[in-house]
Structures are given as C-alpha cells and as structure tokens.
Image (tube, helix red, strand yellow):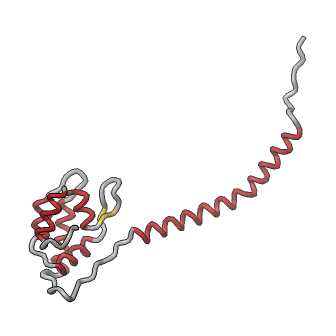
Amino acid sequence: MKTKKSNLGNPLAVVAGAKVVEKSAEAIPFLIKLFTVLGVAYYAYSKYTNRFVKRKENSAYSAANLSYAQAKSRADAIYGSISTFSNDFENVSRQIAGLNYNGFVRVFNAFEHKKGTLFGGDLNLEEWCYNQFTNYQMQQLSFLLGGAFFQ
C-alpha cells in the first residue's frame, strides 16, 4: 500500500513566504503614495504643455480689420464647418479671406483650442486646418492671407 504524502510542505518556505507577505504589506502604502504623486505630476505637466497660448497682435502691422465679436463669429463658423469625417473648405476659405495679420491673430485667439478628432486631442486653428486639409488646400489658405500663415 502506498503511503500518503503530507501536504504540510517545507516549514522554512512557509516562514519565508510569511515574511515576504509582511514586507510587501509594508511597501503597499509607499507605492500608493508614489503612484498618486506621479499621477498628479503627470496631470499637471500635461495641462501645462497642452495649454492654449494666445498670440499677440503686432503693432508694426496695420490694425485688425475686424472686431473681437466678428473674430469670434468667424472662429465659430470655421469650427462648425470642420468635423471628424468631413470639412467645408469653401466656408473656411470665405471666413479667412481678406484678413490682415492682426485680424488673423484675433480669429486664431477666438478659436482657441477646440476638441479635435478622436485621437487628435485639442487643436488650435492652424492644427485643425493641417489635420483636415491637403497640402494644396493649405497653400490656398495661405495665399488668401498673403502667404504669411500656415507655414
């Protein structure tokens, strides 16, 4: 008849395992604190790097040829014509046509960061246009603004 083997195992291994569990229980609060601090730091860093920085109007150029309210209206019209799956290039070109440097700066600042595509994140006016339009269309928009923008 075969003898049954005891399932007690090695008592030294059981003691060593208990010590490992005890040591890891001491490390868990430290790890929780560490990951909390790292998470807060990453969140603050991403908010800082993804913030919208307004452009300043240049006094060396002529005054803006539209008001702040008109700039906001044009920015909203541009945002309304661009979506994830389609865009209205003609409307964007109509909204941008005829703007001088400071006028474009006002529209750019009024546009701010808008929700981008699914994986694109928040985008400003230029990033939106680069995301939605071909190189040829971007050249056309740049031409409408005197060739000074979207480069």
Q: Quadrant location of residue 139? A: bottom left
The x and y percentages for residue 98 are 9, 74
| Quadrant showing the C terminus | bottom left
Q: Residue at x 17, y 60 (%)?
A: 81
Picture quadrant where residue 55 is located:
bottom left
Count of residue discs: 0
Q: Nearer the viewer, residue 63 or 114?
A: 63
In this view, the residue in front, 146 or 104, is 146
The N terminus is located in which quarter?
top right
Residue at left 84%, top 40%? Answer: 13
Above or below residue 22? Residue 54 is below
Q: How far across and down, in percent of the image, does residue 12 sit?
A: 88, 40
Q: In the rendered view, does 127 fall on the left or right side of 4? A: left
Left or right placement of residue 111 versus residue 77 in this view: right
In the image, residue 11 lies at what x, y percent? 89, 38
- Kindly give the residue lying farthest to the top in the view shown: 1
